[in-house]
């Protein structure tokens, strides 16, 4: 390999973080990475997570043994209830299989690997349709396991909303039994989600075409601040009887980024053979997991399990989620009203219409570059900003800078 391995380009997002860290300006603003920051631009350890930390550290039985291959049961069972709803027919009918993964990334990977091995029609893999745009890592995770990817329209540049008709047409035109990757809430990078009615229509077309839904859920609780409401698209598809996969991340909603807590859930379609199918799928997921990571990391799973299994801590978590989503909503309002106050050319209602961690500002690559060079404001090239990087101290500065570069 020494002679032939070419140098790969640096990951764009992590490269941006590096540039931000190296910038010595006192005015610098990080709107790049999708990680929550408090009003002082500092990482926020959720108070409920601090309490869970204490519970875990004070446990006299604490050790560092291996977890089972499929993970920590008190975590995986509650994680399934969190996304499916505790009364889900999929749970009562025992047609779910959950594997603890290396957070959402690992869940997307394991799900993709599983599909690449077992989801074939006439011996050939099915193509995965990704929203355009989507999380930058989807493409490489899926192609790394040999799956073909294609895209469906998602974002309408003119309305800065959902490209609903285009999306539906593309899903309708995709070959039968394609894999359709969907963000169930707080779409990254656009902050644009389908309405309930639109989800119903999407499900209907997908049923007609026998497509396979793969939900990537990285922001449950971040879109509306309500964990159940943010899971409603997934729950609707399950009600409709789909066989599907869900990747679930606790990076953002519990602030466990570096602990890598997440799950992959497989749900079988209802029917007489559902349990037997689930058993077969579970056995194969365990085989794949064993060769990939042997068993998942323990600490983040324990934190999540502690919160998910204790009603008082769970209630506190809901409050912590409100704190995060509430501050982000305040920042959306502040940024929009500053830009409107300044009379910045263009319309800015999309800042408050979009939801979740991100906003797709509509700034172009040149404007983004100018913001970085002239104002030390860092965001991804596509004009996506992480709303959590804004705070009461820097939002005026950012609005004025945006106003300037838009006028240049
Ligand atoms: N999917 C989407 C859509 C995401 O935005 C992210 C986080 N940026 C992930 C998956 C995975 O994140 P993690 O591996 O930290 O859970």
Image (cartoon, helix red, strand yellow):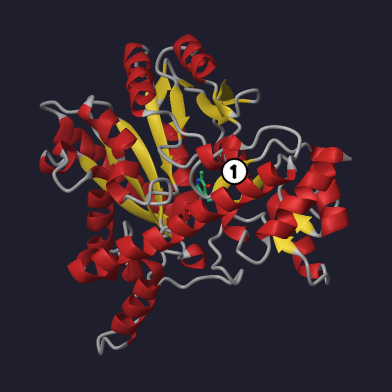
Nearest to the observer: residue 224 or residue 82: 224
Q: How many marks?
A: 1
Which residue is depicted at the point 62% across and 59% down?
390
- Residue shown at the point (45%, 11%) measured from the top left: 172
- Quarter where residue 285 is shown: top left
Q: Is residue 219 visible?
A: yes
Please give the name of the residue rendered at 45% of the width and 60% of the height, measured from the top-left corner: 324
Q: Is residue 197 above or below residue 2?
A: above
Q: Is residue 251 visible?
A: no
As displayed, is residue 208 above or below residue 136?
above
What's the residue at 22%, 42% (across, down)? 96
Query: Viewer-proximal residue, 244 or 158?
Result: 158
The percent coordinates of residue 211 (x first, y second) are 38, 20
**Above or below 233: residue 17:** below
Q: Secondary structure at mark 1?
A: strand
Q: Which image quarter: residue 189?
A: top right
Q: Is residue 87 left or right of residue 263?
A: left
Q: Vertical placement of 103 versus 52: above or below? A: above
State the image coordinates of residue 186 (x, y, percent, origin top left): 47, 42
Question: Label 1 CB, ligand 1: below 8 Å?
Answer: no
> Residue 48 placed where, x, y %?
34, 72
Left or right, residue 68 beside residue 89? right
Q: Is residue 57 left or right of residue 157?
A: left
Q: Quadrant of the C terminus?
A: top right
Q: Kindly identify which residue carries mark 1.
A: 359
Q: Nearer the viewer, residue 255 or 245?
A: 255
Residue 50 placement (x, y as % from top left)? 38, 78
Relative to 279, is 272 on the left or the right? left
Q: Counting other residues with Cα less than 10 Å from the Cα at mark 1, is it few (<14), some (14-19), or many (20 or more)?
A: many
């Amino acid at each position: 390999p020494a002679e032939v391995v070419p140098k790969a380009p640096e990951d764009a997002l992590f490269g941006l973080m590096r540039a931000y860290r190296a910038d010595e300006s006192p005015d610098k603003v990080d709107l790049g990475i999708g990680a929550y920051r408090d009003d002082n631009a500092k990482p926020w350890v959720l108070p409920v997570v601090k309490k869970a930390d204490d519970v875990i550290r004070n446990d006299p039985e604490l050790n560092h043994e291996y977890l089972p291959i499929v993970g920590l049961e008190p975590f995986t069972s509650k994680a399934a209830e969190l996304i499916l709803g505790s009364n889900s027919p999929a749970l009562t009918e025992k047609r779910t299989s959950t594997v603890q993964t290396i957070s959402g990334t690992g869940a997307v990977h394991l799900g993709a690997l599983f599909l690449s091995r077992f989801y074939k029609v006439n011996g050939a893999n099915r193509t995965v349709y990704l929203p355009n745009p989507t999380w930058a890592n989807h493409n490489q995770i899926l192609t790394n396991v040999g799956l073909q990817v294609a895209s469906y329209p998602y974002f309408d540049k003119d309305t800065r909303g959902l490209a609903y008709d285009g999306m539906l047409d593309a899903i309708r035109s995709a070959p039968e039994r394609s894999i359709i990757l969907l963000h169930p809430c707080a779409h990254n990078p656009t902050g644009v989600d389908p309405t309930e009615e639109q989800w119903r229509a999407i499900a209907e077309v997908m049923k007609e075409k026998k497509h396979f839904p793969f939900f990537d859920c990285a922001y449950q609780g971040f879109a509306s601040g309500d964990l159940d409401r943010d899971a409603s698209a997934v729950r609707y598809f399950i009600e409709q009887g789909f066989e599907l996969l869900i990747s679930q991340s606790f990076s953002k909603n519990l602030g466990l980024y570096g602990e890598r807590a997440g799950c992959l859930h497989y749900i079988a379609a209802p029917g007489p053979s559902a349990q037997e199918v689930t058993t077969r799928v579970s056995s194969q997921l365990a085989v794949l997991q064993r060769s990939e990571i042997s068993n998942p990391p323990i600490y983040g799973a324990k934190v999540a399990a502690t919160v998910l299994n204790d009603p008082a801590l769970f209630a506190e978590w809901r409050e912590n989620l409100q704190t995060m989503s509430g501050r982000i909503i305040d920042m959306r309002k502040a940024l929009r009203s500053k830009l409107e106050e300044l009379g910045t050319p263009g319309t800015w209602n999309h800042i408050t219409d979009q939801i979740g961690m991100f906003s797709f500002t509509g700034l172009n690559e040149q404007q983004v570059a100018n913001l970085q060079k002239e104002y030390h404001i860092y965001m991804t090239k596509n004009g996506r900003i992480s709303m959590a990087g804004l705070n009461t101290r820097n939002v005026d500065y950012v609005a004025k800078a945006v106003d300037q570069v838009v006028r240049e």
